[in-house]
Amino acid sequence: MEIILMRHGKPVLSQVGWLAPAEMERWIEHYNFSEVEADGIPLNSLKVANSASFIVTSTASRALSSVQALGHTASVADAVFCEAQLPFALWRFPRLPPFVWAAFFRLLWFFGYSRGADSIQVTKTRAKAAAQQLSSFAAKGHVLLVGHGIMNRLIAKELIALGWAARTNHESKYWSASVYGLQT
């Protein structure tokens, strides 16, 4: 039995320019509805998807379109696997690129700031439920979760707590996959 955690492909986003933190709420919404580039999928990611007997995904467009780009349909799509929400602020300045704000607010989130988002504790609880669900799906064979960077990391920690061992190093690049197997 194996559980494979794969990050979705690179999202297609229109260039927005620099934003004030108060504009991040709309950018996050746009990001959450983005789909992925269907070309440039690594051969290894295609092999992983083809070897899975059960494919699970979050309900986010970028995860669902990643499964499609891999040439498959998800057996299960569930919001429990969605990315850890990104907080924002209502400040009107300064203006910075959205990915700078995203990194800044993600860092703040790890320290407890969660305006407009679930807290890290709520998200960790969701990751625990996700890991339990993946463990039960593993009885059906090799499970592939097409998910998200931060959430996949949190799920990986919970899988390890449930007795699963990392067989590969965890990576956060688009299309990267990490494999977990039951310890014997």
Image (cartoon, grey):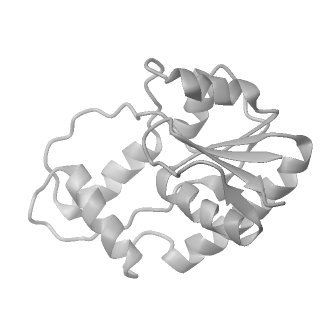
Residue 152 pos. (x, y %):
57, 55
As drawn, the residue found furthest toward the right would be 139
Residue 65 pos. (x, y %):
56, 30
- Toward the viewer: 84 or 145? 145
User: What residue appears at the point 64 percent right and 54 percent down from the top-left corner?
Assistant: 81
Dividing the picture into quarters, in which one does residue 51 lie?
Answer: top right
- Toward the viewer: 50 or 73? 50
Q: Is residue 66 above or below residue 137?
A: above
> Is residue 132 something that shows in the picture?
yes
Q: Is residue 73 above or below residue 3?
A: above
Residue 175 pos. (x, y %):
50, 35
> Is residue 114 something that shows in the picture?
no
Dividing the picture into quarters, in which one does residue 75 lie?
Answer: top right
- Toward the viewer: 161 or 67? 161
As drawn, the residue found furthest toward the front would be 184
Judge from the rendering whether residue 183 lies leftward or rightward of residue 177; answer left or right: right
| Quadrant for the C terminus in the image | bottom right
User: What residue appears at the point 76 percent right and 32 percent down from the top-left corner?
Assistant: 52
User: What residue appears at the point 60 percent right and 35 percent down from the top-left corner?
Assistant: 64
Judge from the rendering whether residue 21 lies leftward or rightward of residue 127; answer left or right: left
- Toward the viewer: 35 or 152? 152
Q: Is residue 157 above or below residue 31?
A: below
Dividing the picture into quarters, in which one does residue 96 lie?
Answer: bottom left
Residue 108 pos. (x, y %):
32, 74
Count of picture labels: 0
